[in-house]
Amino acid sequence: MNFSNLLSSKYFAPLFWTQFLGAFNDNLYKNALIIFMTLNAGAYTDISIDLLIPLSGGIFILPFFLFSAIAGQLADKFEKSRLIRIIKVGEIIIMIIAALGFYFENVWFLLTVLFFMGCQSSLFGPVKYSFLPQHLTEEGLLKGNAVIEMGTFLAILIGTIMGGILIADKELGRIYVSALVIGIALLGWLSSLKIPLAQSVNVNLNINFNIFSQTWNILRTAAEHQLIYGAIIAISWFWFIGATMLSILPLPAFTQDILSANERVITLSLALFSIGIGMGSIIAGKSKTLVKSIKWIIIGALGISIFSLDLYWASTQLISHHAQQSSLLLSAWQDMFQSPLTLHVLVDVFVLGAFGGLYIVPLYVILQEHSEIKTRSRTIAANNIVNALFMVISAVATMMLLARGVTVYQLFAILGIINSLMIVYLYYRFSAEVRKVLLLK
C-alpha cells in the first residue's frame, strides 16, 4: 500500500478529511477568538488580556481531562462511524452557537463555546485512533498515522493563519469567521457520512459516567501494561515539545529579537515547523512493519535534542550578529534567507519538526496494535488525558521560565537537555519491554 492508495481508500480518506476539517475548525476558531479578545477585551470584560489568553487555552484543554474517559467507553461500546457522525452534528450546532456569540460580541459566551469545542474534540479523539486498526494492516497503520499527523499539523497551521486573517477585518471579520466555521463543520459532517462501519468491540460494556473514578480506572489499567505505558509517556512527551515550540515560535522574542523579522513573517517559522513534522511523519510511515519503524523513535528523539541545542547556538550567534550590525526588522519573509545565520535558525526549526515526525508515528502504532481490542479506545483516551496534562505542564513551565527572565534561546537549550534526559529515562525504563514484545515476537 502506498500513500496515494491510502488517500483514495474508502477505509481511510473519509476519516482523514473529517479529522483534518475538525482540526482546522478548532484552530481557526481559537485563534480568531484570541485575536478578537486581544482587540476588544477591554470593552467587554475587566479581566486583563494577559489572563484571558491562557484562560482560553485552559478552557479548551479542560474537557480532555473531564470527558476522555467517557469518550473511550463510548468508542469501545458503540459502532464508530455512527458515533463520529453524531459528534460532527454536535460540531455544527456548536459552530452555529459560536456565530451567535460573535454577533452579540460576548467574550464569555464565546469562551463557553470554546469549552464545548473542547468537549467535541475530546469525544472524537479515541474514536479516531481506535477506528484505524479495525480497517488497516500494520503497514497501513504506519502510513495512516503518518498522514494523520501531517494533516493535523497542517490543519493547525492553516486554521491559525485563516482565523487571524479573517477576524482582522473590523467590519466583517466576525461574519467571515462565523460563516467559515459553520461551513467547515458542515463539510466535516458530509465527509463523515462516507466513513465505513467499524463494529462495536465491546457491546456489553456498562458505561461508568463518574468521570473521576473512570479516569482513574483507565489510567491505572494503561499503566499496568508496560509497553502501553511507555508509549503513552513517549507520545505525551512529543506533545510537550510540540506545544512548547508552537508557543515559542510566535513570540516577539523569537521573531524580532532572534530573527530580526517583522511580525508579518511570524507564520513562516510556524509553517516550517509544521511542514517539518509532516515530512518526518511521511518518512516514518514508509516503513513496511512496526519492527522496522522502531529505529525512527530513537533517531527522532536524538535529533530533537541535537537540533534544539543547535537552535540555541545559532540563535545566540544571530543575536550577537544583530547587535554588531544594528539590523533593522525585515519586512518580507524572502529577506530572511539572505543571512546564513538566519537561514541556519530556520533550517533548525524545520529539521527539529521533521525529527518530531519521525519520532511520533511508530509510537501511535504501538499504542493501537498492542492495546487490547476490547479496551483500545479507553487506552487511547488514557493517552489523550496524559497528552493534555503534558501540554498544560508545557504552558505553565514556559510562562514561569519566561517570567523569571529566561530567554527564548535559553528555552531551546533547556528543551534539548530535558529531552536528552527523557531519552535516557525511556530507554532504561522501557527498552527491554520493546525488545521482548516487538523485536523478538
Image (cartoon, rainbow, N blue to C red):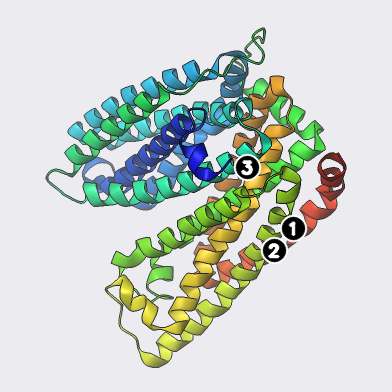
On the question of residue 407 being in view, the answer is: no
Q: Amino acid at mark 1?
A: Ile
Using the image, tell me which numbered label, if any, was put on residue 143. none
Above or below, comparing residue 162 to residue 9 in the picture: below
Determine crowd level at label 1: few under 14, some 14-19, many 20+ residues with C-alpha closer than 10 A.
some
Which residue shows up at 62% across the image and 12% down it? 207
Image coordinates for residue 142, horizontal then vertical, percent: 63, 42
Vertical order, 331 against 302 (above or below)? below
Quadrant in the rendering for residue 232: top right
Quadrant placement of the N terminus: top right
348 displayed left or right of 374 = left
Assess whether mark 1 and mark 2 are in contact (beta carbons under 8 angstroms): yes
Type of the residue with mark 2: Leu
Q: Residues within 10 Å of mark 3 (few under 14, many from 20)?
A: many
Residue at point 46%, 57% (across, down): 275
Instruction: Determine which quarter of the picture holds residue 118.
Output: top left
Point 35% across, 89% down: residue: 326
Mark drawn on residue 142: 3
**In front of the other: 385 or 154:** 154
Q: CA distance from mark 2 to mark 1?
A: 8 Å
Amino acid type indicated by mark 3:
Leu
Q: Which residue is mark 2?
A: 302
Left or right: residue 184 versus residue 403 is left
Q: Residue at x 21, y 44 (%)?
A: 43
Element class at badge 1: helix
In the rendered image, which residue does mark 1 sit on?
A: 423
